[in-house]
Image: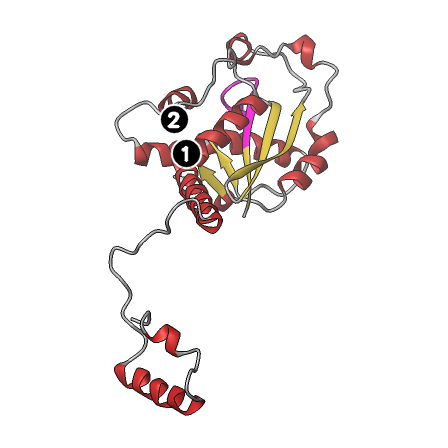
Amino acid sequence: MREIVLDTETTGLDPLRGDRLVEVGCVEIFNRMPTGQTFHRYFNPEREMAAEAFAVHGLSTEFLADKPFFHEVVDDFLAFIGDAPLVIHNASFDIGFINAELDRIKRAPIPRDRLVDTLLLARRKHPGVSNRLDDLCSRYAIDNSHRTKHGALLDAELLAEVYIDLIGARQSQLILAAETVEIRVNLLGEMPRRVREMPLSPRLTEADREAHRAFVATLGDKPIWNDFFATVP
């Protein structure tokens, strides 16, 4: 299954008061594994950057001045995300800004039933504690030492790692990998095969065995089947 992990940076906290999108970063994952495919763009917000927002992400009005407007890259953005579920931390914030930008250019909004909110998932799994992205990175031993400021693509990459741990997909992958290695070792004859804790019930009845012995008796003096009778359970 294809999913897109997404993060944004903005000029402030409220698109209804004129705050704008300035950065979007997306990371593609397939069957809960990053594929290496990403989408990353900065946008000219057509307004000054608030000092509080600049302190968070470090994107200045001057830096964004020569960047494209949202409407100039929207088709590339929508083509990348396609119809995949969108994995977002505090999804209502990011999708609020994205849909506000789409509304400005008379494009259809992204429906909220496509969203997977990792903040809600984290609160269910870890109630009563802080579940910021930095906290989750620390909890799952994900290196975020290079995250000195917020950045949409960097945060999406970190969130992709967090998401895989949060839903238990990494543990499942490790179990599957361990079983695959064990099967390969068994085929090479380097370690004994696993034994079931509870053996399966025999599929042959005693009547089946007697019928087979009667058939073998018709094959001559030394049929090869006699060599296997002693080993048949």
Give the image location of residue 31, x and y in percent: 52, 45
Vertical placement of 152 versus 229: above or below?
above
Q: At 36% across and 85% down in the image, what residue appears? A: 212
Local crowd size for mark 2, using a 10 Å CA cut-off: few (<14), some (14–19), many (≥20):
few
Instruction: Name the amino acid, label 1.
Output: Asp
Mark yes or no: residue 144 visible. Answer: yes
Local crowd size for mark 1, using a 10 Å CA cut-off: few (<14), some (14–19), many (≥20):
many
The image quadrant where one finds the C terminus is bottom left
Mark yes or no: residue 18 visible. Answer: no
Nearer the observer, 207 or 96? 207
Dot placed on the residue nearer the N-terminal end, 1 or 2 = 2
* Magenta highlight on residue 169: no
Q: At 48% across and 13% down in the image, what residue appears? A: 145
Numbered range of the magenta stretch: 6-19
- Return the residue at label 1: 165
Q: Is residue 7 left or right of residue 125?
A: right
Q: At 56% across and 19% down in the image, what residue appears? A: 151
Which colour scheme appears in the figure?
secondary structure
> What is the count of numbered marks?
2
Q: At 27% across and 62% down in the image, what residue appears? A: 199
Tags 1 and 2 touching, CB below 8 Å = yes
- Return the residue at label 2: 140
